[in-house]
């Protein structure tokens, strides 16, 4: 992903915008000194590609500078979801560092996630962006619905592909959509790109790549989270099916790869990326956004 993504980052003005976003993130997280600010600063230090602020910038129409507050707000919500997700999933590592709950305790992590959500809406309110508040609130609702759906689907190998894709649209697509809408661009592009992004994350979790996902490989299988490659493999392999349901895990990821489910999942991700690019007719920064869609899928090789 790095080569294509770096080409996107060369878009005029984007580097300066991301610097401004980073500075606002620092100020926002430190806004109320105390434990939650300390834990939030640790989450911020863990970094990330800042894809969502990039989408906000690239979605802004010509002649109108994108809001730095909008870029920071959407990233703060993303950070909040990571802190909460690690707590819910019991994931002890995030991007090579101890997850917030593991380092500071469950209560501190829960409070920090709430704090980051609050800071996101505070930044938009301070900027006078009431429409942005509504957009981000809808995305936050989608995130909550997606998490609830994932809880219901846990250890269920009969989860349908359609149900999985709906979960992806809520848990990942809605925030990508919001990032684009906050910049003034196409929500359809963001939603489709987010689904593609999540599918590739799920492939990488099975393929043993923790650099891109920030998680220890095999996390979804251990948690009983039915992802596209696991579900496709389970249609052909009863051992994989039993593992999703809570059975033995040894050697299961090898069996998943043997079914060809990773490649078939990648084709679905490619299709969503193609649909995302097709939605960009007449968009000013179409070339950069198309390149970003390619970069998202390139992560899977």
Image (cartoon, helix red, strand yellow):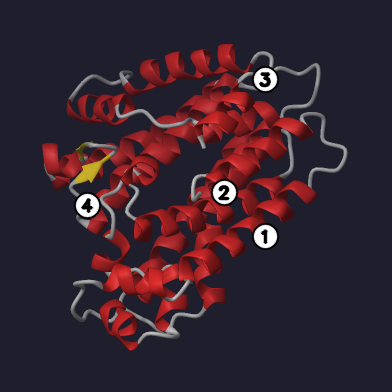
Give the residue drawn at x 52%, y 37%: 1
Residue 135 in view? no
N-terminal label among 2 and 4: 4
| Contact, mark 2 vs mark 4 (Cβ under 8 Å) | no
Disc 4: which residue: 91
Name the front one of labels 2 and 4. Answer: 2
Mark closer to the chain start, 3 or 1: 3
Expressed as whole percent of the image width and height from the top left, the position of residue 201 reads 44, 53
Which residue in the structure is indicated by mark 3?
A: 11
Which residue is label 2 attached to?
297
State which mark lies toward you, 1 or 4.
1
In terms of depth relative to the viewer, which is nearer, 245 or 90?
245
Q: Which of marks 4 and 3 is in front?
A: 3
Corner quadrant of residue 233: bottom left
Provide the residue designation for mark 1: 271
| Left or right of residue 141, residue 277 in this image | right
Query: In whole angstroms, how far apart are the C-alphas of marks 2 and 3?
Result: 20 Å
Q: Which of marks 2 and 3 is nearer the N terminus?
A: 3
Mark 1 falls on what kind of element? Answer: helix
Q: Distance between the residues labelled 1 and 4?
A: 30 Å
The answer to whether the residue labelled 4 contacts the one labelled 3, judged by CB atoms less than 8 Å apart, is no
Query: Circle 2 sits in a helix, a strand or a loop, which is it?
Result: helix
Whole-number angstrom distance, CA of label 3 to CA of label 1: 25 Å
**At which x and y percent is residue 65?**
70, 17
Give the residue displayed 79% in from the left and 43% down from the top.
Answer: 280
How would you rate the neighbour count of disc 1 (Cα within 10 Å): few for under 14, some for 14-19, many for 20 or more?
A: some
Q: Is mark 4 on a helix, strand or loop?
A: loop
Give the crowd class for mark 3: few <14, some 14-19, many >=20 residues within 10 Å.
some
Which residue is nearer to you in this view: 253 or 121?
253
Which of the two marks, 2 or 3, is nearer to us in this view?
Answer: 2
Vertical arrangement, residue 193 with respect to residue 206, above or below: above
Q: Position of residue 4 (x, y in %)?
A: 59, 32
């Amino acid at each position: 992903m790095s080569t294509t993504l770096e080409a996107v980052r060369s878009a005029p003005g984007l580097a300066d915008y991301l610097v401004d976003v980073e500075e606002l993130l620092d100020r926002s997280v430190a806004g109320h000194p105390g434990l939650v600010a300390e834990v939030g600063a640790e989450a911020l230090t863990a970094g990330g590609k800042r894809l969502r602020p990039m989408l906000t910038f690239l979605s802004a129409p010509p002649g109108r500078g994108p809001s730095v507050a909008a870029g920071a707000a959407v990233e703060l919500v993303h950070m909040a979801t990571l802190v909460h997700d690690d707590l819910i999933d019991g994931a002890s590592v995030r991007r090579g560092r101890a997850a917030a709950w593991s380092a500071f305790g469950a209560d501190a992590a829960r409070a920090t996630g709430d704090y980051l959500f609050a800071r996101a809406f505070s930044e938009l309110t301070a900027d006078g962006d009431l429409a942005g508040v509504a957009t981000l609130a809808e995305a936050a609702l989608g995130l909550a619905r997606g998490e609830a759906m994932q809880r219901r689907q846990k250890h269920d190998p009969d989860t349908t592909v359609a149900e999985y894709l709906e979960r992806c649209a809520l848990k990942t697509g809605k925030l990508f959509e919001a990032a684009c809408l906050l910049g003034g661009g196409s929500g359809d592009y963001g939603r489709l790109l987010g689904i593609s992004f999540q599918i590739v994350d799920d492939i990488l979790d099975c393929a043993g790549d923790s650099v891109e996902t920030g998680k220890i490989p095999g996390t979804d299988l251990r948690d009983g989270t039915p992802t596209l490659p696991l579900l496709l493999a389970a249609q052909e392999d009863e051992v994989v099916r039993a593992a999703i349901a809570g059975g033995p895990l040894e050697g299961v990821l090898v069996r998943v790869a043997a079914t060809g489910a990773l490649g078939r999942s990648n084709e679905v991700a490619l299709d969503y990326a193609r649909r995302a690019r097709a939605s960009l007719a007449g968009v000013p920064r179409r070339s950069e956004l198309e390149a970003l869609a390619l970069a998202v899928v390139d992560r899977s090789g």
